[in-house]
Amino acid sequence: MIRVLRGAWSRRGSLTTLVLMTVAVVGGAVTVLQFAHTAQTSAALAAPLLLLGAVAVPSIGAELAVSRREEIGLARLRGIHGLRLWRFLLVEPLLAIILGTVVGLVVGGIGTVVSTGFWLEETAAPLDRTALLTAAAIAGAGLVIVALSAASSLREPLAVQVSTRQRPRRATTLAIFLSVLVIVGAGVASYRSRLSDGDPDLLVLLGPALVGLALGQAAIWVIRLLASGFTPVTETRGLGAFLATRRLARSGDLVTPIRLVVAAAVVGTLALTGAVSVDRWTGSQARIETGATMVIDAGPGAVGAQQLTERLDPEGSQLMTTVLIRNEERLAERRAYVDAARWDAVVGDFYDGTPAQAAAGSVSRLATRDASLGGSGTRLSVVASALRKDLTGVISAPGRADFVSRVSDTLLVRVEYVAANNVSGSAEVPLKLPTKGARATGTVQLPDCADGCSITRVSVGRDIEAYFLDTSEFVVVLEEIRLDGLNLLDQTWVPDAEALEGAPPAYADPVINTPGGLQVTLLPSTMLPLLLEASLAPLPVLVADEADPAARDLGGQERTPAVVGEAATLPLLGTVGVLSDLGAASLGSRSTVPDAEVRIVAADGTPQALLDQVAGATGNSWRSLDSVRTALGKKHGGAQAQAYLLTALACALVALLALVAGVGRNLRDYRRDVASLRVLGIGLGTVRRAGRAELLTLTLLVSGAVIAGGWIAVTLLLGGLPLVDLPVAALPLDTSAKWTPLIIPAVLAAAVVLGVGGRARVVRASTTRPSLLREEEG
């Protein structure tokens, strides 16, 4: 064990890199998996991180094998072969991976608690069985990758293994094949993503990393090809340029790791674009669904909500009732209602800047002069008089001597209503009418309307004790039907056409609205239903994506639509539905359908005291626009974009470690090269200029590769990745490439290359003195 620890200490640089890489992959994977499990999203979102880790680890394994090449050769000379040789080679990486896995579990547990506590309502447990199994699988896979990457060193000839000189090796056939395979995989993932119409498969989820690796590999090839092509040209353009192009064409310390830098930046571009897209979608969709910055659920019925707003805000400037009937399975019946008369005052410019802006400007056109026939009270009274004939008498059926019926002297007036609690009911007022010209008054108590109700229908008829045939007429004048201060006869009433089907010609026009009241010719054998004339008028509507729009009232009964405008997106409804005025739609309507979402919205600046009154009356609490937005993201899987961000952060850490490790592996060789140049009389200034030219070239190429790769990944892949589960008729998710998410990862990648590469190209006289060569030879 002491020998193992001594060997590990002598190779502490490479082993530390392996430990940190394991910590990054395990910690990132555990965090993403735990976050995804808590948010109920796909656990495969961590796939890009695992792929980049699998690409980064082989170089570390190869470095460890190269650093032990001489020891391996001596072991073979001593007769150590087979499993003993493998154990000799892998014991140090195994210890490093175990240590990294343990630390990674701790980091992953902390990351899980922090990320879920910050983004989700529920803080997840730091670790569970799945996290432990994932960490163990990553550790096992890491050890296998290290073993495979070190296998070539075991097969080298003894002469090479015991040699003190290390020569650069050309890319193997396997390396070239894997590079081409990555490019092909990126193309296939992009193609499958465009065809995906459901949950994407693993290859599509790996797509961002594959595209990034492909662009990174292409950038490496471009760099080396251009450098090789410009090397002869720079021979006459200055020694600094020549040195820069020569190193770009042959060196691997900065060039090779940029593949991972580009890949991580591309994953970050896609994740950042997805997060921005989801954030904008939830913001716009929340505005579409709410209608104001404050919203509260108002109970089951629209009648009570509307009368509450009228009572608490009689001026109509701060409160408004909205009703949404989603009908996501029957889009032809998808509809919403707003109090159009209050729209401009309460909603104002709330929809400015959203897709529903155009439609919001037309909502006030839905308002009609006919208000909802609603009021509150506990006393229903009727005043009526008779115009012709006596109500009493005996009526016989012609041709039937056995049929004789006595007609009662009682007139019934039935009023049907919908109470504030959305319960339908009716009340009958009996009036005794003796003779022609007499006036009678009847009154009943109506406790259901104490908190408000909406009158839907009035029926008038004789109290008939038996069915009879009567061709005579009896005409009454309803002078007043009053619910406390509300006179129902202020509105125009018409007979129900269905009740008149088959009636004798004498009853063709049984209802006349006069200044003195409502003149009604009673039907001989049934009650005569009266409807509000306004309830039969066409209902003004705004429509979206409706070729043949169908208007309905609050109770679901069809109304004739009068389309006043069409729009791609409507307030409350989104991209499909019919929007109409609440007052007009409630005229004559029965109780609000059970699946309606009745809400009250408040304008900006509404006094807190008024908000408290509404909350007390409804028994619910106000919800802000931000809380609705958060709920939308949670309901429709917006946390998937946050999981992508976590994956991108872990990928960035892996790429940074790979770049730092690549620079560290070749730092000694670079200093020796500079010392050799100084022996030849080349000054440090020339070397520094060459280093700056090399860094500038790499930075520009990396930035360009990141922008190009990010644009390709976003354009080809983002639309097929699971960011949000769009509800029916929702706003589309804009997954197009945006400049800010493209530029930020490119700038960060350039900064990393400049920062790490700049440290690697620092030329000091003390560390590059020519005597360094003599010390190494000695």
Image (spheres, helix red, strand yellow):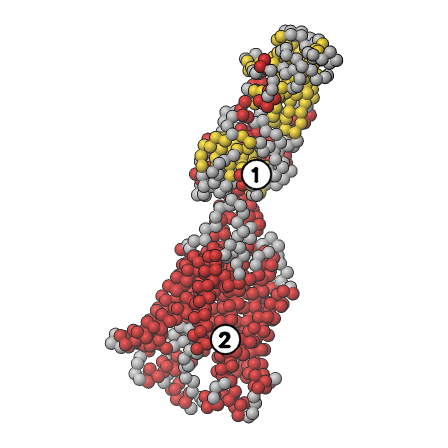
Kind of residue indicated by mark 2: Pro
Q: Earlier in the sequence, mark 2 or mark 1?
A: 2
Residue 526, image quadrant: top right
Answer with left or right where residue 607 lies relative to residue 698: right
Asked if residue 267 can be seen in this view, the reply is no
Q: Is residue 139 depicted above or below 487 in this figure?
A: below
Residue lying at the far right of the rendered structure: 402
- Label 2, secondary structure: give it: helix
Residue 67 drawn at (x, y percent): 49, 83
Residue 262, image quadrant: bottom left
The residue at which mark 2 appears reads as 58
If the image is split into quadrants, where does the N terminus sit? bottom right
Q: Residues within 10 Å of mark 1 (few under 14, many from 20)?
A: many
Residue 98 drawn at (x, y percent): 59, 74
Asked if residue 145 can be seen in this view, the reply is yes
Residue in view at x 70 percent, y 17 percent: 467
Q: Residues within 10 Å of mark 2 (few under 14, many from 20)?
A: many
Residue 34 drawn at (x, y percent): 60, 61
